[in-house]
Amino acid sequence: MPVAGLVLTLVDDDDLCAFAIDNLRAIPGVSLGELQRARKLPIATDVDTIEAQTALWQDLARVPGVLLVDLVFEDFSDVEAGSFSSDDLPSKWRRRRDDGEQHSFNEFSGTEEQV
């Protein structure tokens, strides 16, 4: 079961912030921490599959009042090895070129590399 710790940044508006927290409490697989300064809300997620985790994170980002979703910790060590590959994980920088090759942008060197 993939488990993750995330920090959500919520809006400054008190009513919309409260609305977001109420909506987040209703999402299965999400445990809320205490709201911190600067409207940071630590949460934990616990779902059955990598795919469900990815979908959950996308749902979190769509909750009105949530500005940012930051991943702090992730553990999927108990997920069966053959059930997914690293290609199944989302990659912000991965893209496919017209020639069909996959490339990633290396933010440290500022270059594009073939995957």
Image (spheres, rainbow, N blue to C red):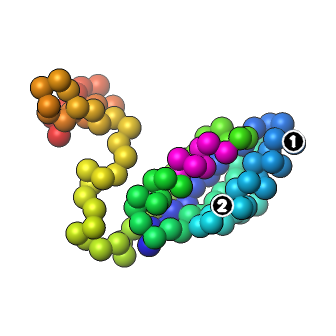
| Residue under label 1 | 14
Q: Earlier in the sequence, mark 2 or mark 1?
A: 1
Specify whether residue 75 is in view.
Answer: no
Q: Residues within 10 Å of mark 2 (few under 14, many from 20)?
A: few
- Residue at position x 46%, y 70% from top? 48
Q: Mark number for residue 27?
A: 2
Task: Please state which amino acid type lies under the numbered disc 1.
Answer: Asp
Residue nearer the viewer, 60 or 107: 60
> What is the secondary structure assignment of the residue under circle 1?
helix
Q: Position of residue 89 (x, y in %)?
A: 34, 51
Give the number of the mark in front: 2 or 1.
Answer: 2
Q: Position of residue 55 (x, y in %)?
A: 49, 53
Are the two marked residues, 2 and 1, in contact with CB atoms closer than 8 angstroms? no
Q: Is residue 29 left or right of residue 108?
A: right
Which of the 4 image quadrants contains residue 101?
A: top left
Residue nearer the viewer, 15 or 8: 15
Quadrant location of the C terminus? top left
- Residue at position x 35%, y 42% from top? 91
Is 27 rendered above or below residue 10? Answer: below
- Residue at position x 66%, y 57% from top? 42
Residue 69 on the magenta span: no
Q: Which residues are magenta?
A: 57-63
Task: Please state which amino acid type lies under the numbered disc 2.
Answer: Ile
> What is the secondary structure assignment of the residue under circle 2?
loop
Q: Residues within 10 Å of mark 1 (few under 14, many from 20)?
A: few
Residue nearer the viewer, 27 or 11: 27
Q: Mark number for residue 102?
A: none
How many marks the image carries: the answer is 2
Label 2 – label 1 distance at C-alpha: 21 Å
Q: Position of residue 13 (x, y in %)?
A: 84, 36
Specify whether residue 85 is in view.
Answer: yes
